[in-house]
Amino acid sequence: MSPPSLTDRLVRGVFQLWSSTYDWSPLQLVLYRPVHRAVMRAVERWPAPRRSLDLGCGTARLTRDLARRYPRATTIGLDVSSGMLAAARRSPEARMLALVRGDAYALPFASGSLDLVTTTVAYHWLLDPAAALAEMRRVLVPGGGLVLGTLVSYLGSRRYLGMRVVTVRQHEQDLAAAGFVVEGHAPVGHRVVVFAARAGG
Ligand SMILES: C[S@@+](CC[C@H](N)C(=O)[O-])C[C@H]1O[C@@H](n2cnc3c(N)ncnc32)[C@H](O)[C@@H]1O
């Protein structure tokens, strides 16, 4: 894995600084929690996972939703920010989770060891989507599910403020190129789409 670019390092620094107040952001109400609910609806269409990963979990609100819904499963939250993980650990429900510091580009899990990966409002910060998707595909069993909630653009693909914001079509092409079979997608408001995909065999 190559070292993080300057942009990556700046983005990581911003999340580290933001971590202590992240849970109080108005974005929780207007954006993040609606995305989490849409992700849960997509996950619930599939059989219950046994070992799932919430990638870029932040303060682990979706991770806790997953653990509450699937109490027999192992539910892992991974984030690159120690501050986000420290905030996640302050919740009494953190004991239901495995919280791991790690990088989306080098997931610290064996190949084929997970049957569900979720990721919400984190993927558009990953400027090398092919490398990130390859890691998600690697850790999933064949047929394992990926539910990805991310920003989309309706006016062509672009990068700004360290984010990569691309069209629904481009997301679907990236997923297919990484070996995923897209089952569907659902909009959440105007700017976010939740994709449900299976790891190809
Ligand atoms: C906007 S927050 C979303 C957090 C959470 N998924 C949510 O829905 O509230 C984006 C998260 O992605 C994490 N992140 C960014 N780059 C990452 C990377 N390369 N590997 C793992 N996590 C990363 C950040 O630290 C941050 O916690």
Image: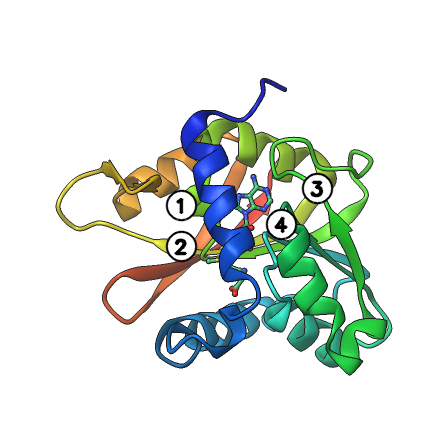
Q: Going from the N terminus, do you reach mark 1 or mark 3 first? A: 3
Give the residue at mark 2: 150
Which residue is more in the foreground, 57 or 180?
Answer: 57
Q: Is residue 2 left or right of residue 175?
A: right
How would you rate the neighbour count of disc 3 (Cα within 10 Å): few for under 14, some for 14-19, many for 20 or more?
some
Label 3 element class:
loop
Give the residue at mark 3: 102
CB of residue at label 4: within 8 Å of ligand 1? yes
Colouring style: rainbow
CA gap, disc 4 and disc 3 = 8 Å
Asked if labels 3 and 1 touch by Cβ distance under 8 angstroms, the answer is no
Residue 179 appears in view: no
Q: Going from the N terminus, do you reach mark 4 or mark 2 first? A: 4
Pair 3/2: label in front = 3
CB of residue at label 3: within 8 Å of ligand 1? yes
Q: Amino acid at mark 3?
A: Gly
Label 2 element class:
strand
User: In x, y percent, where is residue 49?
Assistant: 75, 63
How would you rate the neighbour count of disc 2 (Cα within 10 Å): few for under 14, some for 14-19, many for 20 or more?
many
Q: Amino acid at mark 1?
A: His
Residue 78 appears in view: yes
Asked if labels 2 and 4 touch by Cβ distance under 8 angstroms, the answer is no
Q: Which mark is residue 124?
A: 1
Q: Is residue 171 left or right of residue 52?
A: left
Asked if labels 3 and 4 touch by Cβ distance under 8 angstroms, the answer is no
How would you rate the neighbour count of disc 4 (Cα within 10 Å): few for under 14, some for 14-19, many for 20 or more?
many
Q: Amino acid at mark 2?
A: Thr
Taking the spot 64% from the left edge, 57% from the top edge, the residue there is 83
